Amino acid sequence: MAVMDGFSLAGRVAVVTGAASGIGRQTAQTFAEAGARVVLGDVDEAGLAETAGMIGAAAVPLRTDVSRRADVDALAAKALELGRIDVWANVAGTAGPCPMLDVTEELLDRIIAINLKSVFWGSTAAARVMKEQGSGSIINISSTGAVSAPPNLSVYAMTKSGVSAVTRNIAREMGPFGVRANTVSPGFVETPLATWSYRNPDGTLDEAKRADALRLRRGAAPLGIIGEPTDIAYAMLYLASDASRFVTGQNLYVNGGVTMD
Ligand SMILES: NC(=O)c1ccc[n+]([C@@H]2O[C@H](COP(=O)([O-])OP(=O)(O)OC[C@H]3O[C@@H](n4cnc5c(N)ncnc54)[C@H](O)[C@@H]3O)[C@@H](O)[C@H]2O)c1
């Protein structure tokens, strides 16, 4: 179907961080289904191997701690072994829930490093290559939580606001070289990161608290639903592909209408 050609990633190389789980895993699978070879970074080696196994020959996994610039540069170098970098999706993140008055310097530094420094170094590593190519799409994951002021997530919200802010700067500086940069801000998707408020100390889920939390989440959305990883991955595919060639510096909320602009 010719209309779908605009969404094709055939012949493209895409880097996805946070690819061992949740939204990153689904994004990697969706990009691969659209024809890309996908270079996958995550600290979780077992999860990464599982994602790579699901995708098959098009996947190149590399253990990457996105909070370390050297690791991010190594991920870019790995992708360049495939000849080019067309798409770079910064998906890895952490919530680090904590009441504001209890946040330690160590926790603050860790969340900033994983959620924000990672995006800066990932985006600049990608932009350096894409500038030479004269094309490329950078997609950074922020969160609806950046603007909804969720309790116990002050540092998370602070870093996610930084993500959408710096993405606009990347779009401004790199646009003249054919490089686009956009943010996707998901609403609630039930992944390991998002279930902290109803997880027991042993890692299992408290089903009563879960039912309450999901009811509240659905109630907050005009559409009355919570998201699936595919809901986010389809938005990522749009921004990764030529279908969005006229779109840069934008922040796309994929959240059932929890926020509107
Ligand atoms: N799930 C939601 O409701 C939701 C909502 C808004 C935004 N987000 C954002 O979506 C992104 C993906 O989260 P998810 O919901 O899929 O959660 P997830 O827990 O399923 O996945 C997060 C991934 O990030 C990886 N990661 C954590 N620290 C890392 C590090 N230092 N280096 C490399 N990888 C690291 C984890 O190993 C994991 O695979 C995050 O940036 C998150 O903030 C999620």
Image (cartoon, grey):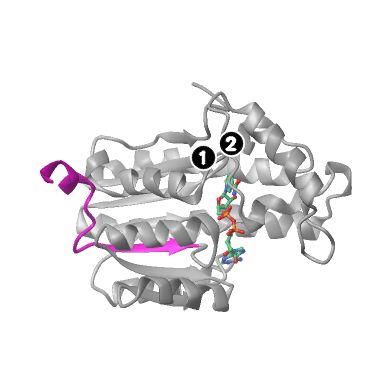
Is residue 60 in the magenta section? no
Kindly identify the residue that appears in the image at 63 percent across and 46 percent down: 159
Is residue 5 in the magenta section? yes
Question: Where's ligand 1: which quadrant?
Answer: bottom right
Circle 1 packing at 10 Å, graded few (<14), some (14-19), many (20+), is many
Cβ atoms under marks 1 and 2 closer than 8 Å: yes
Furthest residue toward top = 261
Circle 2 packing at 10 Å, graded few (<14), some (14-19), many (20+), is many
Q: Tell me, yes or no, if residue 94 can be seen here.
A: no
| Above/below status of 84 relative to 198 | below
How far across and how far down the image is residue 59, in percent?
36, 73
How far across and how far down the image is residue 79, in percent?
34, 71
Kindly identify the residue that appears in the image at 47 percent across and 56 percent down: 90
| Above/below status of 138 relative to 164 | below
Kindly identify the residue that appears in the image at 26 percent across and 48 percent down: 241
| Above/below status of 223 relative to 103 | above
Dot label at residue 57: none
Task: Check disc 2 and report the residue beneath it.
Answer: 144
Furthest residue toward right = 102
